[in-house]
């Protein structure tokens, strides 16, 4: 399936929506689904187990083995957001890891079964570059980075970029 990817619009009329998206501390997937009034489709662009990560990931997650995943979330033929995530493999329940490997469900849907909190963290040029290598169209203005923490330890670090499809879907 071919989907259109565009940067998030820069017009002042879209500034409030972007501020809201960047401030979210709940499920981005479910929020995007509410905006576009349709389920998000996931396109798995890259998924691999890694033993070396950018310093920012190691600093905020710990661990020694991670699952790197790059996805595009889309609906109505347009990309709503691009995501880069690192999941600390020693911190995930087996069912969660199985669903990640299947690559069919958005992380936001899986996280609703785990107690988590989201914490904003600084990104890095190296981390951002990993996403841009796969999807192009760098857009720091419409991007954010955060980690997901369970009651026991950090679970994931996510760098995501919101795209123009979210504006068109309103």
Image (cartoon, helix red, strand yellow):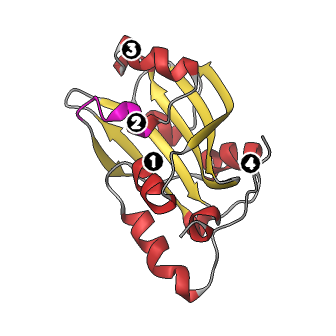
Please state the total of marks drawn on the protein image: 4
User: Residue 95 shows which numbered tag?
Assistant: 3
Residue pictured at 40% horizontal, 49% vertical: 30
User: Residue 109 shows which numbered tag?
Assistant: 2
Question: How far apart, in angstroms, are the residues tagged by discs 4 and 1?
Answer: 18 Å
Sequence-wise, which precedes: disc 1 or disc 3? 1
Residue pictured at 70% horizontal, 60% vertical: 138
Question: How far apart, in angstroms, are the residues tagged by discs 3 and 2?
Answer: 13 Å
Q: Which residue lies furthest to the bottom in this view?
A: 12
- Residue 58 screen position, x and y as percent: 46, 33
* Pointers 3 and 2 in contact (C-beta within 8 Å): no
- Residue 103 screen position, x and y as percent: 58, 25
Q: Which residue lies furthest to the right in this view?
A: 2
Q: Does the magenta stretch include residue 114?
A: yes
Question: How far apart, in angstroms, are the residues tagged by discs 2 and 4?
Answer: 23 Å
- Residue 127 screen position, x and y as percent: 60, 45
Question: How far apart, in angstroms, are the residues tagged by discs 3 and 4?
Answer: 28 Å
Element class at badge 3: helix
Which residues make up the magenta segment? 108-115
Q: Mark 1 points at which residue?
A: 29
Q: Is residue 38 left or right of residue 80?
A: left
Sequence-wise, which precedes: disc 4 or disc 1? 1
* Pointers 1 and 3 in contact (C-beta within 8 Å): no
Q: In this view, does 45 lie to the left or right of 18?
A: right
- Residue 52 screen position, x and y as percent: 59, 25
């Amino acid at each position: 399936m071919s989907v259109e990817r565009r940067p998030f619009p820069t017009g002042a009329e879209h500034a409030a929506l972007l501020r809201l998206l960047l401030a979210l501390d709940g499920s981005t997937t479910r929020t995007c689904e509410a905006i576009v009034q349709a389920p998000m489709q996931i396109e798995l662009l890259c998924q691999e187990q890694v033993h070396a990560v950018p310093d920012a990931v190691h600093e905020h997650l710990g661990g020694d083995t991670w699952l790197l995943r790059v996805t595009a979330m889309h609906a109505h033929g347009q990309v709503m957001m691009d995501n880069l995530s690192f999941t600390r493999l020693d911190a995930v329940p087996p069912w969660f890891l199985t669903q990640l490997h299947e690559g069919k469900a958005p992380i936001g849907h899986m996280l609703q079964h785990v107690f988590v909190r989201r914490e904003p963290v600084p990104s890095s040029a190296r981390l951002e570059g990993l996403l841009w290598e796969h999807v192009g169209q760098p857009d720091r203005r419409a991007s954010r980075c955060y980690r997901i923490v369970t009651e026991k330890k950090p679970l994931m670090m996510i760098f995501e970029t919101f795209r123009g499809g979210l504006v068109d879907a309103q």
